[in-house]
Image: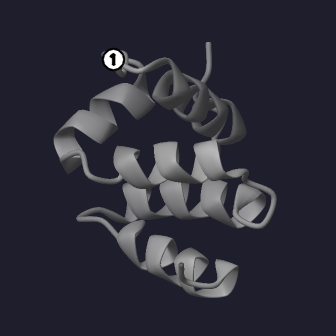
Amino acid sequence: MPSTEARLKRVQWRCRRGTRELDALLGGWLEAHGTSMDEAQYAAFDALLDRQDPELWDWLMGHAEPPRADWRAIVGDIRKRGGLAK
C-alpha cells in the first residue's frame, strides 16, 4: 500500500482537469481535506475523480446530483466551500 503522501500526490494530480474552474474546486477541496480524510472518504473522492468533466461540472454547479451518497456529501461540501450552495 502506498504511503499517505504518495496517495495524496496521486490524487492531487488527478484533480487537474480540463478546466481551471474544476481544478480549483476539486484541488481546493483536496487541499482542505486531504490529510484528514479517512479511508472511505479517500476511496470515494478517488472514485469521483473517475467521472468525466462535464458530469462533474453538472454536479458541482447543482444541475444534477451524483448517484452515490458519499459523492453527494463530497460534492455538497465542495459547493459550500466554493460558495456555490444555495
Residue name at image x 37 percent, y 16 percent = 65
Depicted 71 relative to depicted 43: above or below: above
Give the residue type that dot 1 points to.
Answer: Pro
Front in this rendered view, residue 6 or 60: 6
Quadrant assignment, res 48: top left
Depicted 46 relative to depicted 40: above or below: below
Percent position of residue 3, x then y: 64, 84
Depicted 84 relative to depicted 32: above or below: above
Residue farthest toward the right in the current orientation of the protein: 36
Q: How many marks?
A: 1
Quarter the C terminus occupies: top right
In the shown orientation, is residue 83 left or right of residue 63?
right
Quadrant assignment, res 79: top right
Question: How many C-alpha atoms fall within 10 Å of the one at disc 1: few (<14), some, or many (≥20)?
Answer: few
Residue name at image x 31 percent, y 39 percent = 56
Percent position of residue 40, x then y: 61, 43
Q: Secondary structure at mark 1?
A: loop
Residue name at image x 37 percent, y 70 percent = 14
Percent position of residue 71, x then y: 47, 30
Task: Name the residue that disc number 1 marks.
Answer: 67
Depicted 5 relative to depicted 50: above or below: below
In the shown orientation, is residue 55 left or right of residue 30?
left
Residue farthest toward the front in the current orientation of the protein: 1
Scheme of colours in the image? one colour
Percent position of residue 51, x then y: 24, 45
Residue name at image x 70 percent, y 63 percent = 34
Front in this rendered view, residue 27 or 35: 35
